[in-house]
Image: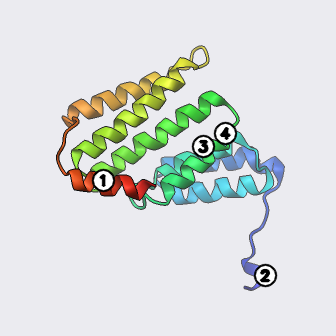
């Protein structure tokens, strides 16, 4: 590959501006661009927690296009977060976004329900150790409850073979 196609490194003093750009790209519904900016930041500052959080969100913004292996990648980055609360919270965010992506993929309702419940368990765990004044996990819990009620999702035994196959896919 010609050297003109090699990645170029950002300067460390440009990181705050690059983080703003990543957020802007997400707001403009260009998560792949936001992901690219976050990867540029992490090239020069591998422990940048803000870039990792933005990367998790940018990756999970793309679940409706490509779910696997994107879910695993997002969870890997979640595991790199230093703060226990943030790890719990963003793990739940990834699961909630995966549940929403399943709605667009015509996944059986029981599986969507189970994924929302899994996310809610993680939001509850995050809420238990949340910092004072941060009710983000509670807000997301409530959003999951509303999504379940709005779509009338519930546990059931329908599509048992599909559920077993889906569970094996996650292994």
Mark 4 or 1, nearer chain start:
4
Q: Could you give the CA–CA distance between mark 3 and mark 1, rounded to whole angstroms?
A: 27 Å
Q: Left or right: where does residue 12 sit relative to residue 52?
A: right
> Could you say which disc has been placed on residue 3 in the image?
2
Q: Residues at badges 3 and 4 in contact (C-beta under 8 Å)?
A: yes
Quick one: SS at disc 4? Answer: loop
Given this view, does label 3 or label 1 mark the residue nearer the observer? 1
Residue at left offset 72%, top offset 53%: 41
Given this view, does label 1 or label 2 mark the residue nearer the observer? 1
Q: Could you give the CA–CA distance between mark 4 and mark 2, rounded to whole angstroms?
A: 33 Å
Mark 1 or 2, nearer chain start:
2
Q: Circle 4 is placed at which residue position?
A: 81
Q: Dividing the image into 4 quarters, which one contains the N terminus?
A: bottom right
Quick one: SS at disc 1? Answer: helix
Residue at left offset 28%, top offset 34%: 147
Given this view, does label 4 or label 2 mark the residue nearer the observer? 4
**Disc 4: CA contacts within 10 A as few (<14), some (14-19) or many (>=20):** some
Task: Please say whether residue 83 is visible from this viewpoint.
Answer: yes
Residue 143, image quadrant = top left
**Disc 3: CA contacts within 10 A as few (<14), some (14-19) or many (>=20):** many
Mark 4 or 2, nearer chain start:
2
Counting every numbered tag in the picture gives 4
- Residue 131 position, x and y percent, is 61, 18
Residue at left offset 56%, top offset 55%: 73
Q: Circle 3 is placed at which residue position?
A: 78
> Could you say which disc has been placed on residue 164 in the image?
1
Given this view, does label 3 or label 2 mark the residue nearer the observer? 3
Quick one: SS at disc 2? Answer: helix
Residue at left offset 52%, top offset 39%: 91
Mark 3 or 2, nearer chain start:
2
- Residue 161 position, x and y percent, is 23, 55
């Amino acid at each position: 590959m010609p050297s003109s196609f090699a990645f170029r490194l950002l300067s460390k003093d440009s990181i705050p501006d690059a983080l703003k750009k990543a957020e802007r790209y997400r707001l403009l519904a260009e998560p792949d661009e936001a992901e690219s900016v976050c990867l540029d930041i992490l090239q020069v500052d591998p422990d940048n927690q803000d870039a990792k959080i933005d990367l998790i969100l940018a990756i999970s913004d793309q679940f409706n296009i490509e779910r696997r292996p994107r879910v695993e990648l997002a969870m890997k980055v979640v595991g790199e977060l230093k703060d226990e609360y943030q790890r719990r919270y963003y793990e739940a965010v990834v699961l909630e976004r995966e549940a929403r992506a399943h709605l667009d993929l015509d996944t059986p309702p029981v599986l969507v329900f189970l994924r929302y419940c899994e996310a809610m368990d993680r939001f509850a765990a995050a809420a238990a150790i949340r910092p004072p004044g941060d009710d983000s996990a509670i807000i997301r819990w409530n959003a999951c409850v509303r999504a379940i009620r709005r779509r009338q999702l519930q546990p059931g035994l329908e599509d048992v073979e599909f559920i077993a196959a889906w569970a094996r896919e996650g292994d």
